[in-house]
Image (cartoon, grey):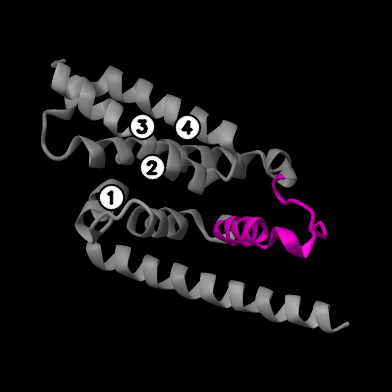
Amino acid sequence: MRAQDEADIVACIPSLRRYGRGLVSDRERADDLVQDTLERAWRQFASWQRRGEVRAWMFGIMHNLFIDRVRSQRSTPEEAAGDELPELPDRATQADRLEVRDLDRVLQRLPPEQREVLLLVGVEEMSYQEVASVVGAPIGTVMSRLSRARERLRVELEGREVSCRLQRVK
């Protein structure tokens, strides 16, 4: 492996951490996902053969690891039961933190395939072609998943705003 290849992989770490955090909504699990992604990338670097950007290849590895974990959680539902956090009343002075928390909760309710496309396009600013390469789906499927994810986010977040307004009126 050349020094430039190593530098390219290391340069992906901040983006991988951000994407991992968006996928799993837990810093420790996200760091585990990044660690596993990096380990697999180092092991399989020779098989990459420079057929595209190293960044897209790394995100593809993370995508596959994430999907494998989602599938394994489906087979052990007792582990996933603790994922839902209880709604806790917070002071209005923490509005920004609450909005981020609410957005994160809504993101976690999206199906994984919609959430990952939304994060790759919206946060990582990948093109539809790059996302299609990462998730292994046609561009039309990427666009469809993105559209459904955005619509579901809009509906969920608008529903929360209405709920919050009604609670303040009481």
Asked whether disc 2 touches disc 1, contact meaning CB atoms under 8 Å apart, the reply is yes
The foreground one among 25 and 90 is 90
Asked whether disc 3 touches disc 1, contact meaning CB atoms under 8 Å apart, the reply is no
User: What segment is highlighted magenta in the picture?
Assistant: 83-107
The residue under label 4 is: 33
Asked whether disc 3 touches disc 4, contact meaning CB atoms under 8 Å apart, the reply is no
> Magenta-highlighted stretch: main secondary structure?
helix
Asked whether disc 4 touches disc 2, contact meaning CB atoms under 8 Å apart, the reply is no
Q: CA distance from mark 4 to mark 2?
A: 10 Å
The amino acid pointed to by label 1 is Gly
- Considering only order in the chain, which callout, 2 or 4, is on the residue closer to the N terminus? 4
Q: Is residue 101 magenta?
A: yes
**Mark toward the viewer: 3 or 4:** 3
Q: Mark on residue 136?
A: 1
User: Mark 3 packing: few (<14 Cα in 10 Å), some, or many (20+)?
Assistant: some
The residue under label 2 is: 63
Rendered image quadrant of residue 117: bottom left
Q: Mark on residue 13?
A: 3
- Point out residue 15 in the picture as x, y percentages from the top left corner: 36, 40
SS at mark 3 in the image: helix
- Considering only order in the chain, which callout, 4 or 1, is on the residue closer to the N terminus? 4
The amino acid pointed to by label 2 is His
Q: CA distance from mark 3 to mark 4?
A: 11 Å
**Mark toward the viewer: 3 or 1:** 3
- Considering only order in the chain, which callout, 3 or 2, is on the residue closer to the N terminus? 3
The foreground one among 159 and 131 is 159
The amino acid pointed to by label 3 is Ile
**Residue drawn at the location 13% of the way across and 40% of the way down:** 52
